[in-house]
Amino acid sequence: MTEDAVRAFIGLGSNLGDRLANLKEAVLRLSKTDGVSVTRVSRVYETSPVGPPQPDFLNAVAEVRTVLSPRDLLAASLRIEEEMGRVRHERWGPRVIDLDLLNYGRMEIDERGLTVPHPRMHERAFVLVPLLELEPDPLLPADHPVTSLPLGPSAPAAVRPFAPPIEVP
Ligand code: ATP
Ligand code: CA
Ligand code: CA
């Protein structure tokens, strides 16, 4: 990886099949992607679902260094979802794997099909808890200070430590 590599964070989620194996498989596939190296992964958390009634999720965040553009990193992530058999049904429904691009360096992007920082990340304890393990000062969507985050007394019940950090492949 060259010195021009950018540090990015990818949020992972799974609530179908062998959820932990799915997260590990996605990390492995990310690490095998040309132009991407996985540098660290958070602990794995079990989290209560948002959206329609469905099984609990496992969530984690991976730190990567990449020479891919934001577009290409998103495309690689969507390709991994597809290869792992993700089928899109209802919005926020159950899924084998979900890969969201949370941060790409400190870049702010708002294009069709790609918004970074991820526009709902600041509302989601299941994203913030693992992300804050890796980065104490993540870039949030504009105008959302870290003091506004939903990490009050109800957060621990909704985001429960499940497994130690996934090993970097
Ligand atoms: P949410 O985005 O609220 O977490 P979701 O993950 O269920 O919901 P998907 O169906 O996985 O949503 O993604 C829909 C589309 O969102 C993708 O095809 C992608 O083009 C777009 N998108 C925009 N910004 C991002 C981003 N930062 N990370 C991932 N997808 C994004
Ligand atoms: Ca998502
Ligand atoms: Ca997604």
Image (cartoon, rainbow, N blue to C red):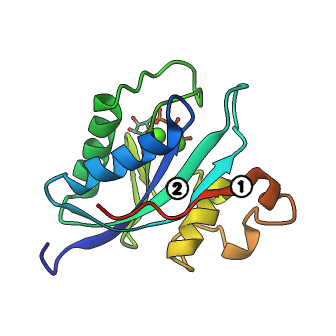
Nearer the observer, 133 or 103:
133
- Percent across and percent down for residue 135 are 51, 76
Residue density around tag 2, few if under 14, some if 14–19, many if 20 or more, within 10 Å: many
Left or right: 137 in relation to 111: right
Residue density around tag 1, few if under 14, some if 14–19, many if 20 or more, within 10 Å: many
Ligand 2 is within 8 Å of the C-beta of the residue at disc 2: no
- Percent across and percent down for residue 101 are 41, 53
Nearer the observer, 131 or 27:
27
| Above or below for 48 versus 154 | above
Whether residue 73 is visible: yes
What residue sits 31% from the left and 47% below the top?
A: 74
Q: Which label's residue is closer to the chain start, 1 or 2?
A: 2
Give SS at disc 1: strand
Nearer the observer, 143 or 140:
140
Q: Which residue is mark 1?
A: 159
Q: CA distance from mark 1 to mark 2?
A: 11 Å
Give SS at disc 2: strand
> In which image quadrant can residue 105 be found?
bottom left
Left or right: 168 in relation to 149: left
> Residue type at mark 1?
Val
| Above or below for 19 versus 89 | below
> In which image quadrant can residue 5 be found?
bottom left
Quadrant position of the C terminus in the picture: bottom left
> Residue type at mark 2?
Ala
What residue sits 58% from the left and 72% below the top?
A: 132
Left or right: 91 in relation to 22: right
Q: Which residue is mark 2?
A: 60
Q: What is the total number of numbered labels drawn onto the structure image?
A: 2
- Percent across and percent down for residue 94 are 57, 27
Whether residue 140 is visible: no
